[in-house]
Image (cartoon, rainbow, N blue to C red):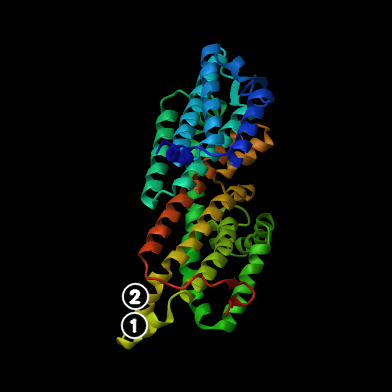
Amino acid sequence: MRNRIDARLYGRPDRLGLLLCAVGAAALLWLPFMLFKANRILPGTPHSLFATLPAGSALAVLMVITATGAVALFVTDGRIRLGVALLALAALAVALAAGANALRPPGNAVARIAPGSGFWLLAVAVGLLAADALTRLAPRPLARVMLLLAFLALCAVALRSGAFDNLSVMREYAVNAERFGRELRTHLLLALGSLGAAVLLALPLGFVCFRHRRLRAAVLVALNLVQTIPAIALFGILMAPLAALATAAPWVAALGIRGIGAAPAAIALFLYSLLPIVANTVVGLARVPPETVEAARGMGMTGAQVLARIELPLALPVLLTGIRIVLVQNIGLTTVAALIGAGGLGAFVFQGIGQTAIDLVLLGTIPAIVLAFAAAILLDALIEVLDRGSAAAPDGVPLDLAGGVAA
């Protein structure tokens, strides 16, 4: 019995574990754990883990990281890997807060203390170990959502506790707190608003494309061409006609439609959103079993009833997959839209780049990453629940963007 348990828990050195251990060792030996900067612009002075924390605390963190590496190498049980990875993340967070408090000069409001490249590499390595553990465990959708909510709640409590206030990114947040809330709302409004408008057009358009093959090919090719245009180029293409329209019709300008700002950003995001939703609508409807549709018609259902009660519910998981793709895409592209004055979290990113203030860049990028990550997890969980509850259907039909659904 013991041999069977050992075989289940322990095995040969894990390949991912070897990579993560190599990355962690390089981060500890050659890269700085934290940076002390005299102000927000200067590159900063590097500090190792032992130069940042007292010897006892640094040794404790090193022991946790070493134990995490051993688990990553030799332990295959997903629960143990996940537990150790979460412990290592907690140890890194505590070390980061303690290091910021230790390095901050008393009464100095200008100095900045930031995580070094060693900390970021360690955090990425431990995060990959946690992701690998979750993949091995394959938790149910509700469990994934609960883990996400618990993680976000712990992060919120930790940030509100004040333990991380001496970190440079939190100092930037303290200076821009009111503006941060405004830009976050703008970011969400652009991403969600363009998605909602695209859904209203793309769903009926996808249904029409599913019914008419010739129209399907033309529409999908046109929408695919839009996807090939880089975001910056599409923003620029839209600026000229919108500026001319605002000049010719002052009432349009009064509505906020101008060559720069939210209008070209929203239109570009709307255009980028169409292809995934239209294509997935076609694929979702194509995977509905024809015998199910015929049975519904044999029961006397009208075409509209078949669509509403049979086709759309069975196609819903695939439709939501397209919406998930668009939402994650829009959250990222909205960051770029700040270049044309649309606002959003990207405003901090490009302001920080212009001022060579990396901490201001992080103030915009970290929330955008969290938003995209959370949106993907929540929608993936919903899709899995709906997919399990839907009736049996044939395997997904491959999509040919030049000609629609392949035969």
Where is residue 243 shown, x and y percent of the image? 64, 59
The residue closer to the viewer here, 361 or 351, is 361
Counting from the top left corner in percent of width and height, residue 385 is at 38, 59
Residue type highlighted by circle 1: Ala
| Closer to the camera in the image, 49 or 15 | 15
- Above-or-below relation of 91 to 79: above
Q: Which residue is mark 2?
A: 309
Above-or-below relation of 232 to 10: below
Q: Residue at x 56, y 31 (%)?
A: 69
On screen, residue 145 versus residue 264, left or right, reads left
Q: Which mark is residue 334?
A: none
Instruction: Identify the element where label 1 is drawn.
Output: helix
Q: Residue type at mark 2: give it.
A: Arg
On the question of residue 284 being in view, the answer is yes
* Cα distance in 3D space between marks 2 and 1: 9 Å
Residue extending furthest toward the left: 299
| Residue 351 position within the rendered picture, expressed as x and y whole percent measured from the top left | 63, 38
Q: Nearer the viewer, residue 394 or 369?
A: 394
The correct choice, above or below, for 220 with respect to 139 in the image is below
Mark positioned earlier in the residue sequence (2 or 1): 1
The location of residue 263, given as percent across then percent down, is 56, 57
Q: Residue at x 43, y 72 (%)?
A: 393
